[in-house]
Amino acid sequence: MLLLSGCPKFFKDKDNDMLDYKLVPGGSEFGSGGTLCICRGLYKGNSIPGKYHEARKSCHFTWEGFEHSELRNFQVLRLSKSSNAKLQWEASSSSVPEKVVENGKTSEGEPLYVIRGSVSIPGPPEQTVWIPGRYQPSVGPYTGYGLKEIRCEENKWEFLTCI
């Protein structure tokens, strides 16, 4: 992983130092279409990427087959308003891109990376949205919806990169 000086940083949701930073969007909610941003929560010694609901002030991430909610012990990903770094979503592949945004680690030290997965919910009307999640090299890409952990389908997820 290559970390450039202008790339996003994590802040606690109520951190006063984040005033010069903006949230990093990663997808949208079903139904409302509200923006989902990137966060990471702590769970059983793991620092896990997930989705941040700004209106609810909560971070949701998946682990061990379930979606978990964190209201206090989490951080949100923010990019400096003056940064010239560019964030982009890069199509999934068999290897982790060089400039991927690392978001967390397992309790054993395995890196976890920011992704977003395309998730469809049957209708009517059928809806497909991008939902932030994690890529863990040993097990693959996951996101969550409806309190469940969802394995992202091949070619239906992307890495967040910073250039």
Image (spheres, rainbow, N blue to C red):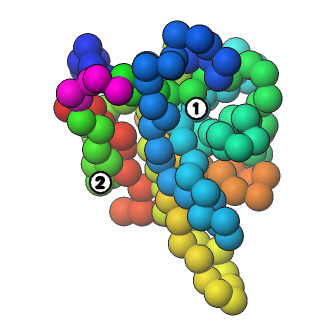
Q: Residue at x 78, y 22 (%)?
A: 72
Disc 1 to disc 2, C-alpha distance: 20 Å
Main secondary-structure element of the magenta-colored stretch: loop
Q: Position of residue 66 (x, y in %)?
A: 76, 45
Q: Is residue 162 visible?
A: yes
Q: Residue at x 50, y 59 (%)?
A: 130
Label 2 SS: strand
Whether label 1 touches label 2, CB < 8 Å? no
Q: Which residues are magenta?
A: 81-85
- Judge whether 40 appears above or below 108 on screen: below
The kind of residue tagged 2 is Ala
- Judge whether 56 appears above or below 144 on screen: above
Q: Is residue 110 visible?
A: no
Neighbour class for label 1 at 10 Å: few (<14), some, many (≥20)?
many
* Front-lying residue, 154 or 3: 3
- Judge whether 20 appears above or below 161 on screen: above
Q: Position of residue 133 (x, y in %)?
A: 55, 44
Quarter of the picture containing the N terminus is: top left
Q: Nearer the viewer, mark 1 or mark 2?
A: 1
How many numbered discs, if any?
A: 2
* Front-lying residue, 82 or 92: 82
Residue lying at the far top in this picture: please name it: 17
Q: Which residue is mark 2?
A: 91
Q: Residue at x 53, y 37 (%)?
A: 38
**Residue 123: quarter of image:** bottom right
The kind of residue tagged 1 is Cys
User: Image check: 163 left or right of 108?
Assistant: left
Quarter of the picture containing the C terminus is: top left
Neighbour class for label 2 at 10 Å: few (<14), some, many (≥20)?
some
Q: Which residue is mark 1?
A: 39
* Front-lying residue, 140 or 47: 47
